[in-house]
Image (cartoon, helix red, strand yellow):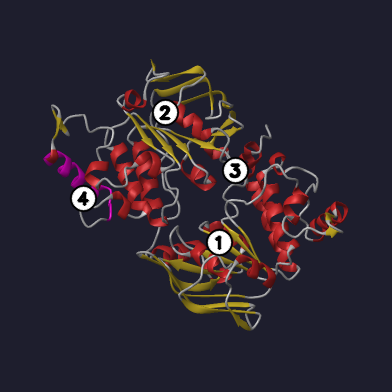
């Protein structure tokens, strides 16, 4: 069967980087085709070329049998190509209808025909099973509903091909199921879907075929019926990868962290952490699950001394640490893996050696009086590079020049080597490849087995389910339930993440 779309030998360069290196991709009419690869593999760049946001230096695109050059997104939209970006492009104070018709408004004379717009949007939503409230304001609807609005925007403009960039990143499991049902419905009506993702379980569930990219190149295209997550992972990384976390039964020790009735505000002085109470024992991983933006970032900042609580108390090994500075908390043997490694974890223009002692540079053996002990610092860096498999030519390479996975390994190595009693790990595998994820998971499990208490915050539900011994679910700043990981299911957690209590 002739593909509806082909992209041949697409090459796109940025200063110092070949983002797409002779990439080939094709799409059949009525299929869901997953574009799979790690961050930096070139997936989004390739789709931005298709959508006219970037111009390739080499290669050609053929659509419906006709070779063409797509110079800008408006041209792509006219051709019937729509794109739903990872970060939605909706105007919050406007209604659903106003967002869908924006730039393509039906008119009556010189005025917008609001009645026709409402009718058109209502009919469109019913036709494709994307049920929404046309009069609701974007700021008052859920993230899942906002995604429906983005899809309807593309359909309103006549899209036959819809590109979805990491569409499940901010959805609950129930919203993911609803989205997948919608996508199947769209392909049943002749639409073709390109689904950019790094989640292999989703690829197997929703896609007909998958094209794997690695370091800007096409590794291959496979039918999902004839492959497995393990094979896809190997194509993505270039070696065999252990996808399942193996761990022993937890051997619990004494209570290490106790949080009692902690509340806190965000940068706008609005309360986003609401009367949180939890505890973690030695040898235990407590996972915090929740859709991003429900107060988990601010809670972690309170626990690490980066933000002051408005009420409540925090105890570490029975000692009150409420209100201590970030340095004082670190000196209490708390390791912290921040969610944003560039802002909070590393100084990108410092070497590996320098980054490996950040926050502990004043301690022995790294300091001799007022001076740094350079020989000890170098020895420490060499030890971490070997022990934590940090891929680098040498210890003096700047952190900026390393891959995301190797940058993250520096932080994890530094924080685990201070012999912490408590490790606070926030999004520890965000933006790293599958191989690095496997390694980081092993380090977290080993720390737990050595008797450390671990607080894990992750937007990846599979990560929470596979690593945690107990799971706390946060919704609108409140812990709605804490359950044993053995009793947890995606469905149960998904309901709690949406605020539905048992």
For marks 4 and 2, the one nearer the N-term is 2
Q: Is residue 258 left or right of residue 484?
A: left
x 59%, y 28%: residue? 478
Instruction: Give the quarter of the image for residue 418.
Output: top left
Q: On the image, numbered disc 3 is attached to which residue?
A: 489
For marks 1 and 3, the one nearer the N-term is 1
Q: Which mark is residue 395?
A: 4
Q: On the image, numbered disc 1 is attached to which residue?
A: 196
Q: CA distance from mark 3 to mark 4?
A: 43 Å
Q: Is residue 388 magenta?
A: yes
Pointer 1 with pointer 3, Cβ within 8 A: no
At label 1, counting other C-alpha atoms closer than 10 Å, the crowd grade (few under 14, some 14-19, many 20 or more) is many
**492 is higher (above) or lower (below) than 218:** above
User: The residue tagged with tag 2: helix, strand or loop?
Assistant: loop
At label 4, counting other C-alpha atoms closer than 10 Å, the crowd grade (few under 14, some 14-19, many 20 or more) is many
**337 is higher (above) or lower (below) than 6:** above
Q: On the image, numbered disc 2 is attached to which residue?
A: 306
Image position, residue 295 (x, y; %): 55, 32
Q: Nearer the viewer, mark 2 or mark 1?
A: 2
Instruction: Give the quarter of the image for residue 393.
Output: bottom left
For marks 3 and 4, the one nearer the N-term is 4
Image position, residue 246 (x, y; %): 41, 48
Nearest the viewer among 194 and 435 is 194
x 42%, y 56%: residue? 434
Q: CA distance from mark 2 to mark 1?
A: 35 Å
Image position, residue 327 (x, y; %): 32, 26
**The magenta segment:** 375-391
User: The residue tagged with tag 3: helix, strand or loop?
Assistant: loop
Q: Is residue 248 left or right of residue 147?
A: left
**192 is higher (above) or lower (below) than 443:** below
Nearest the viewer among 93 and 367 is 93
Q: Main secondary structure of the magenta part?
A: helix
């Amino acid at each position: 069967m002739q593909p509806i779309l082909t992209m041949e030998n697409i090459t796109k360069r940025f200063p110092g980087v070949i983002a797409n290196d002779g990439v080939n991709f094709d799409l059949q009419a009525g299929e869901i085709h997953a574009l799979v690869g790690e961050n930096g593999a070139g997936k989004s760049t390739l789709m931005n070329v298709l959508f006219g946001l970037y111009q390739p230096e080499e290669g050609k695109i053929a659509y419906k049998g006709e070779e063409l050059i797509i110079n800008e997104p408006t041209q792509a939209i006219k051709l019937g190509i729509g794109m739903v970006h990872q970060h939605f492009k909706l105007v919050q104070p406007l209604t659903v209808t106003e967002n869908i018709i924006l730039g393509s408004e039906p008119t009556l004379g010189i005025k917008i025909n609001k009645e026709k717009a409402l009718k058109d949007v209502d009919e469109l939503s019913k036709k494709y099973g994307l049920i929404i409230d046309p009069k609701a304001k974007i700021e008052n609807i859920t993230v899942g509903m906002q995604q429906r609005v983005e899809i309807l925007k593309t359909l309103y403009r006549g899209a036959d091909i819809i590109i979805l960039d990491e569409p499940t990143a901010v959805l609950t499991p129930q919203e993911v199921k609803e989205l997948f049902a919608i996508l199947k419905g769209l392909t049943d009506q002749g639409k073709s879907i390109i689904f950019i993702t790094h989640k292999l379980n989703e690829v197997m569930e929703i896609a007909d075929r998958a094209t794997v990219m690695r370091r800007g190149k096409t590794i291959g295209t496979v039918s999902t019926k004839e492959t497995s997550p393990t094979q896809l992972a190997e194509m993505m990384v270039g070696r065999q990868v252990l996808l399942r976390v193996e761990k022993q039964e937890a051997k619990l020790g004494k209570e290490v962290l106790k949080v009692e009735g902690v509340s806190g505000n965000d940068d706008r002085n609005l309360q986003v952490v609401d009367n949180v109470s939890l505890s973690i024992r030695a040898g235990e991983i407590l996972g915090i699950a929740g859709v991003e933006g429900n107060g988990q970032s601010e809670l972690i900042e309170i626990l690490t001394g980066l933000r002051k609580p408005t009420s409540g108390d925090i105890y570490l090994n029975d000692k009150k640490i409420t209100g201590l500075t970030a340095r004082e908390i670190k000196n209490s043997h708390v390791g912290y893996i921040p969610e944003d490694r560039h802002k909070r974890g590393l100084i990108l223009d410092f070497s590996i050696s320098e980054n490996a002692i950040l926050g502990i540079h004043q301690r022995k053996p790294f300091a001799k009086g007022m001076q740094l002990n350079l020989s000890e610092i170098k020895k420490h860096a060499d030890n971490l590079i070997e022990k934590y498999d940090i891929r680098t030519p040498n210890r003096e390479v700047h952190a900026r020049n390393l891959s995301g996975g190797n940058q993250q390994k520096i932080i994890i190595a530094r924080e685990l080597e201070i012999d912490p009693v408590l490790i606070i790990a926030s999004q520890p595998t965000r933006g790293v490849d599958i191989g690095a994820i496997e390694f980081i998971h092993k380090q977290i499990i080993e720390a737990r087995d050595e008797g450390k208490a671990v607080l894990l915050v992750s937007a990846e539900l599979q990560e929470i389910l596979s690593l945690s011994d107990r799971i706390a679910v946060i919704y609108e700043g409140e812990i709605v339930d804490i359950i044993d990981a053995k009793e947890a299911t995606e469905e149960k957690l998904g309901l709690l993440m949406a605020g539905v209590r048992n």
